[in-house]
Amino acid sequence: MDKGGFYYLLENGSIIWTKELTEPVGGINRLWPVRANDWGFAWQVVTEAMALDAKTEDVSNLVNKWDIGGESEAQKYAENNHLRLFHLRLFMDGDLWCATFDDFEDLQQSCAGFGSTPLKALAALAKVAFKKEDTKSGGNNG
């Protein structure tokens, strides 16, 4: 994990790291201050970046750099997502992974994300949640 600095998701889908808080050329879609040695932060960055349509290569580079993405690590992240105001559930549903918030009732009333891997399911959930929040706020969340 990087020691300090900031990760940016640019409007063109690129993910960059800088040591100082600056305004990169190209506009910012999302900003994450680095929390060194925090595996939860790493999962947050890659799931949110995927949900916001970051370049697949950039996400893959971070997954490999931080050595995250396995099923057991995803379960650990879901169960220990204490840095957020919600808790996550991650489980198999048929041949796909399903990610939900812990208050999940059903697909008509609650957010859920599905994917072939736990990471893809978490990213799909984040995308649904971002869209739901965008609808509530009437703005551009992201």
Image (cartoon, rainbow, N blue to C red):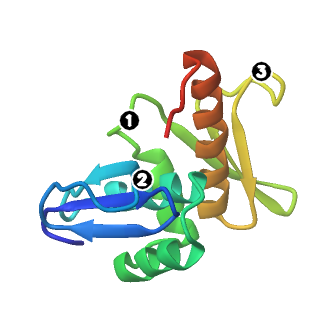
Please indicate whether residue 62 sits to the left or right of residue 113 in the image. Answer: left
Between residue 137 and residue 12, name the one nearer to us.
Answer: 12
Q: Quadrant of the N terminus?
A: bottom left
State the CA–CA distance, disc 3 to disc 2.
24 Å
Name the residue at 56% across, 70% down: 55
Between residue 54 and residue 10, name the one nearer to us.
Answer: 10
Between residue 90 and residue 6, name the one nearer to us.
Answer: 6
Picture disc at residue 68: none
Picture disc at residue 84: 1
Q: Name the residue under label 2.
A: 44
| Dots 2, 1 in contact, CB < 8 A | yes
* Residue type highlighted by circle 3: Gln
Q: In this view, does 94 lie above or below 70?
A: above
Q: Let me know if residue 103 appears in the view.
A: no
Name the residue at 50% across, 48% down: 78
State the CA–CA distance, disc 3 to disc 1.
21 Å
Crowding at label 3, few (<14), some or many (≥20) Cα neighbours within 10 Å?
few
Residue 126 image point, x, y percent: 58, 44
State the CA–CA distance, disc 2 to disc 1.
10 Å
Q: Name the residue under label 3.
A: 109
